Amino acid sequence: MTKQVAIIGGGPAGLMAAEVLSASSSAHGISVTVYDAMPTFARKFLLAGKSGLNITHSEDFTRFSGRFGKASSHLEPALNAFKPEDVRQWAAGLGTETFVGTSGRVFPVAMKASPLLRAWLKRLEAQGVALKTRHRWTGFKDDGYQFDTPDGERIIQPDATLLALGGASWPRLGSDAAWVPWLKDLGITIGDLQPANCGFDVGWSDIFVERYAGAPLKSVSTTSDAGTYPGEFVISKHGIEGSLVYAHSAALRDRLLRNGKATLTIDLMPGRPQERLVRDLSRQDAKASFSNRLRKGAGLDGVKAALIRELLADSNQMPAEQLAGLIKALPIPVLRPRPIAEAISSAGGIAWSGIDERYMLKSRPGLFAAGEMIDWEAPTGGYLLTACFATGRAAAAGMLNWLSDH
Ligand SMILES: Cc1cc2nc3c(=O)[nH]c(=O)nc-3n(C[C@H](O)[C@H](O)[C@H](O)COP(=O)(O)OP(=O)(O)OC[C@H]3O[C@@H](n4cnc5c(N)ncnc54)[C@H](O)[C@@H]3O)c2cc1C
């Protein structure tokens, strides 16, 4: 008899699981249906395509698989079975060639997600997957799963089910984390969903925001508990944003949680040693204005000079040594992460202790999970999508394994 498999959530993790399950559906006698709450699938994947779709990373695999912090060892088998190189081959198989960009990040040549998603959905249909949009899972009902659909309420009772519902960032694209209390009711431990790869609030003055919101700080380097990274970030009306901030966001968020305060330290002149800055600043006329001292002595103007003034009220009178020290290590006190709805991704989710090596929930046999709803996080750089693909595939393999015994 044909076994029914339901995949709830049609983002990268759910669609990848559907691909694996349907590729072997005739061999295993299963029928696969993907349900999604939204009118179309994979909206966050499409949004990721707006900034080029950083689909994976080309660095050495040991380094790659270590990017997931505490979850690295849990994710390793799934990542090992679907490595970054496999991601590139898979995309190529769907007509999307990729290239290695700066810092090893991998993007489709077309720098968007829509052609890849179109070809992917076509492949799934050709493999017999039933694709159902506007089907919102609303919780467990007895032994089944209850849905709101355009035709009213519906309950399904599949032989095996995969939850691939995503985290809690950008809820308007579909992943609104409504599942958290339903899984908690089953006794499953869920780590609090928190913003990851996010901006931070800073207590800027009105005048600084008025003049500099949107201004980029280019060619700086930044330091936190996460280490030191070069790059650029942006002053926002609430605080700081951008990829260089995201690289520190887990460290800043965790320090705020632990200590109630955290700072991101900026080197505004990474190319110039401190001793030289001291010399150059000392040479300036004592009567020169602060702006001129910074511009002529340290080559700093615009938003970089304004940032020093904003953060150091008494910087005008500062001796050269002290000012040079602050140009090399200017602390920006961050108040709190921006709300999770604005974050690129979320940390937290289903605890690894609650799932077995097949990605099955220990407290509910036959129910599996994949993607961002599991408790892992990673920086930007293609790690997020790769782990979603890889866990989708691992969960699909786990489902096939479990179904073969049931
Ligand atoms: C602006 C932005 C840019 C990004 N850029 C990149 C990038 O370049 N590279 C990268 O690696 N990552 C990027 N990401 C992160 C990446 O998109 C996510 O990590 C990834 O989409 C998560 O995949 P997922 O399948 O786990 O969940 P999602 O993609 O969130 O999919 C979950 C699906 O489940 C559905 N769903 C949720 N609840 C229900 C319900 N109750 N009933 C039915 N369906 C439901 C949702 O509608 C959604 O379609 C970006 C994210 C954002 C927000």
Image: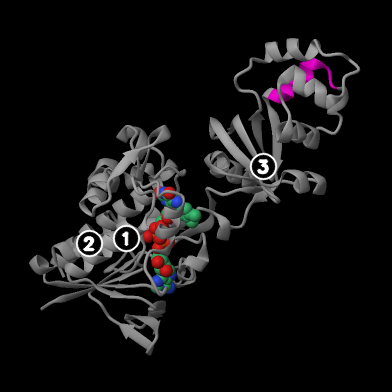
**SS for dot 2:** helix
**SS for dot 1:** helix
> In this figure, which residue is indicated by the disc labeled 2?
19
- Closer to the observer: label 2 or label 3? 3
Q: Is mark 3 within 8 Å of ligand 1?
A: no
Name the amino acid, label 3. Answer: Ala
Name the amino acid, label 1. Answer: Leu
In the rendered image, residue 205, in percent from the top left (x then y), is placed at 80, 46
* Mark earlier in primary sequence (1, 2): 2
Q: Quadrant of the C terminus?
A: bottom left
Q: Nearer the viewer, residue 36 or 122?
A: 122
Can the viewer see residue 45?
A: yes
Q: Are marks 1 and 2 in contact (CB under 8 Å)?
A: no
Q: In this picture, which residue range is highlighted in magenta?
A: 318-327
Q: Is mark 2 within 8 Å of ligand 1?
A: no
Residue lying farthest to the front in this orientation: 110
Name the amino acid, label 2. Answer: Glu
> In this figure, which residue is indicated by the disc labeled 1?
117
Residue located at (80% from left, 11% from top):
282
> In this figure, which residue is indicated by the disc labeled 3?
215
